[in-house]
Amino acid sequence: MGVYSANKEKVIAAMDKIAPRRDSYIKRSKYYYKNLIRFFRFSVPPGSRVAEIGCGTGFLLNALEPSEGLGIDISPEMISIARKNHPHLRFEVMDAEDIYVDDKFDFVIISDTLGYLEDIQKAFGQIKKIIHPGTRILISYHNFLWEPFLWLAQKLGLKMPHHRLNWLGRGDLVNLLHLEGYDVVKTGRRFLFPVYIPLVSWFLNKYIAHLPIFSSFCLTGFIIARQPLNLPDPSKAMSVSVIIPARNEMGNIEDAVRRVPDMGSHTEIIFVEGNSTDETLAEIKRVVEAYKDRRDLSWLVQDGKGKGDAVRKGYDHAKGDILMILDADLTVPPEDLPKFYDAIASGKGEYINGTRLVYPMEDEAMRTLNMMGNKFFSVMFSWLLGQRIKDTLCGTKVLTAENYRKLAANRSYFGNFDPFGDFDLIFGSSKLNLKLIEVPIRYRARTYGDTNISRFKHGWLLLKMVFYAMNKIKFLD
């Protein structure tokens, strides 16, 4: 142990004193801790490499079932108990403001710990020593509105006594993260009613806690952050696969090939034909043969139905580092794809979504009812995902092949519920806590064919998917 300030010495003494009873307090508040574990498990798959700052006796770290787990705590007594209780994990007596570990972890957990730190900004800076570009930092903290109730719970012996050095709100923590160069991916609140009463607690915490106004009174706040990439020259670093699902789009095939720009180190174009009733497949074959000396082109035929099936088949055959979707109707101009490439290759975002609702549209590019539906889903999904998303139904979506493989590996959580493909990617990216960036595009009217979307039939299906996702993403409790 090093030489600590008077404040830190008081924290250590208080934590050492309470350490033998720490697990008994956890048992008394098991409803709260079950909720906390459920929240972290949603984002941290078993078998991940996890570090916890302020690990106490190791209860939470062990519950996350890491393949490699590191717990850091300033209290020697806490660490001694943690080592005894969980010998398969690694625990170190260490100040979060002076980390000296060289290992890198997929997730860093800071749960109800920030109030005990003397210099939170310094701790955020030290965490950079144990993260890699894909690491997610998951922070939970207590809402200051609960301070008198938590004080009373301590006096009644229902909560572990603490020696808190500060009590910061969400805005303070977000500001400190920004000062240290982190991107905040999402923020939120949960757990409105910490006392267990059958049915009542379930209903309040699962549904009411997530509604506007009520969420402001939740006990637990959370922040998920990442350190953005700093790539000096993204323009040549990565290869690209452009997936073009095509059903009854014969008149747009050659135009797509001519207009898709070369991007990054290499660009391939994969058409996925969707059992058209016109000559789309024949036209794809003709164009691929005609341009084979000038472009890297290939084609596939769907086994199933729907754009989602086509996208998944195209992605499974893609060889590029970056995966893009371009609708064959070309209402999103192919010339705009480099904007998406720059956004993801530079590290500014990890899931790039097009938005058609910023710039004025060409006449009849989107019907009024469709526009109203898009705005409704924008509000719903921004609330649902905890990140702003303006146009959920824009067909152009971009992510890296590496993140898509992670998404596909976790697809069983949501199931094969999405025939469009848009929501499979949106929900999957949200579960991975990928940084969402939207790129405004100028939406064009069709020049060939008719839309494959039925406003009422598919609108009802989309609405059902939203309510399904609520229970899988928002209403976890």
Image (cartoon, rainbow, N blue to C red):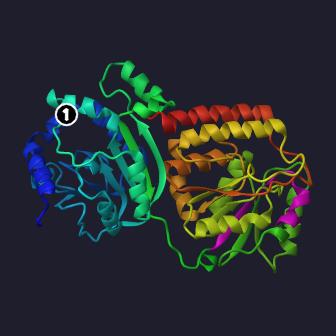
Callout 1 amino acid: Lys
Which residue occupies the foreground of this view, 196 or 412?
Answer: 196
Asked whether residue 415 appears in the rendered view, the answer is no
Q: How many marks?
A: 1
Task: Indicate the position of residue 211 as horizontal and vertical percent values.
Answer: 50, 30
Is residue 393 one of those drawn in magenta? no
Whether the magenta-drawn stretch holds residue 254 is answered as yes
- At a point 71% along the width and 71% down the height, the residue shown is 268
The magenta-colored residue range is: 239-256
The part of the image, by quadrant, that contains residue 104 is bottom left
Q: Mark 1 points at which residue?
A: 159
For the residue pair 47 and 99, the one nearer the viewer reads as 99
Taking the spot 29% from the left edge, 30% from the top edge, the residue there is 31
Callout 1 secondary element: loop
Nearer to me, 19 or 398: 19
Q: Give x and y (percent) for residue 174.
A: 42, 53
Q: Where is residue 300 in the image (x, y as percent from the top left)?
A: 75, 60
Query: Image height check: is 189 above or below 333?
Result: above
Can residue 445 be seen?
yes
